[in-house]
Image (cartoon, rainbow, N blue to C red):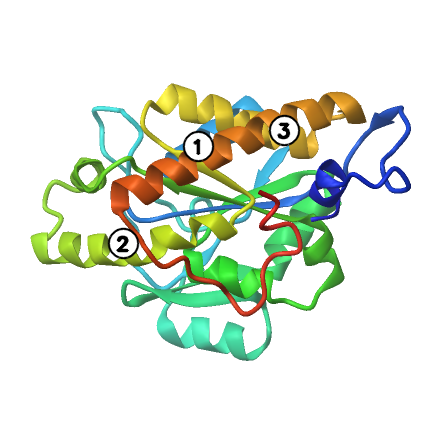
């Protein structure tokens, strides 16, 4: 991402000398294992900031009960939460190049439509979305100038396997145990990729995680003086490293994976 490159640069020739910077709308994707709480963080962040739009994904899975905290169950709605389509429609959209990226996730397909991104950018809104780890990998490899300049990524993880299971059951009390195990194994495979993301949050105390997430959104999108933005960014950079250290210790990964092509903004640590 162009702005993140400026924030980490020590080259005086590229650092703005002063003045207010009003960044272009960005494409911010949060990713992480099932049970990390990323969908709730995205929704709450959007409620906190008016300059955020949501990239609505297209999926072949069935609608679920939303985790709203209300005593009355509320189902996801097509055209609001997701665009729910059948396999044939999804395949047709993919063949016509309507997706920025699309990936199979737990036996169903998800895609990010170009149309959804353009609609939000045309309104001057930054896009905040939920995407799986492999989807982020695909976006990082896209040879597309607008994506390269505006893409930022956040990895969100629960602090433990037990918390992941708790979150899964909170969403669906009848969540099959075999499916829980499958998703936990997927989580253990995904978490070592966290170091390739622009920011990392361990979602332990929700309010703290939300504040950190919104702070990262502000650093990327809010009008402010460059020096102020950089100071706030460097504090977040320290939090990112602390989160990575925690995850590596908690989940005990020994091999740090690499993708063939990293994000233009990834790896600033």
Taking the image as drawn, is residue 12 in sight?
yes
State the residue position of label 1.
Answer: 242
Q: Quadrant of residue 231?
A: top right
Q: CA distance from mark 3 to mark 1?
A: 13 Å
In this picture, residue 98 sits left or right of residue 167: right
- Spatial CA span between label 2 and label 3: 28 Å
Q: Residue at the spot x=48%, y=21% of the render?
A: 211
At mark 1, the secondary structure is helix
Which circle marks residue 234 in the picture?
3
Q: Which residue is at a point 73% across and 52% down the rendered structure image?
A: 149
Disc 2 or disc 3, which is closer to the eye? 3
- Answer whether labels 3 and 1 touch (C-beta < 8 Å): no
Tags 2 and 3 touching, CB below 8 Å: no
Q: Which residue is mark 2?
A: 188
> How crowded is the residue under tag 3: few (<14 C-alpha within 10 Å), some, or many (20+)?
few
| Label 1, residues with CA under 10 Å away: few <14, some 14-19, many ≥20 | some
């Amino acid at each position: 991402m162009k702005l993140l490159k400026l924030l980490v640069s020590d080259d005086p020739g590229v650092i703005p000398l002063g003045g207010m910077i009003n960044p272009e709308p960005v494409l911010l994707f949060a990713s992480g294992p099932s049970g990390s709480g990323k969908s709730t963080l995205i929704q709450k962040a959007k409620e906190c900031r008016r300059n955020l739009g949501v990239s609505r994904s297209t999926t072949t899975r069935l609608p679920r009960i939303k985790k709203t905290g209300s005593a009355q169950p509320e189902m996801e709605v097509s055209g609001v939460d997701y665009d729910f389509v059948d396999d044939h429609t999804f395949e047709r959209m993919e063949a016509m190049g309507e997706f920025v990226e699309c990936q199979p996730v737990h036996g169903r397909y998800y895609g990010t439509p170009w149309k959804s991104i353009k609609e939000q950018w045309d309104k001057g809104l930054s896009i905040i979305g939920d995407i799986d780890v492999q989807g982020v990998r695909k976006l990082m490899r896209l040879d597309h100038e607008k994506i390269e300049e505006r893409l930022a990524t956040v990895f969100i993880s629960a602090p433990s396997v037990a918390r992941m299971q708790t979150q899964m059951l909170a969403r669906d009390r009848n969540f099959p145990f075999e499916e829980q195990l499958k998703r936990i194994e997927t989580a253990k495979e995904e978490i070592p990729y966290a170091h390739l993301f622009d920011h990392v949050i361990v979602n332990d105390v929700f309010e703290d995680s939300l504040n950190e997430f919104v702070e990262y959104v502000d650093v990327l999108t809010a009008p402010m003086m460059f020096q102020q933005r950089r100071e706030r960014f460097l504090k977040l950079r320290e939090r990112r490293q602390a989160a990575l250290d925690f995850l590596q210790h908690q989940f005990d990964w020994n091999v740090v994976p690499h993708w063939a092509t990293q994000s233009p903004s990834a790896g600033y640590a």
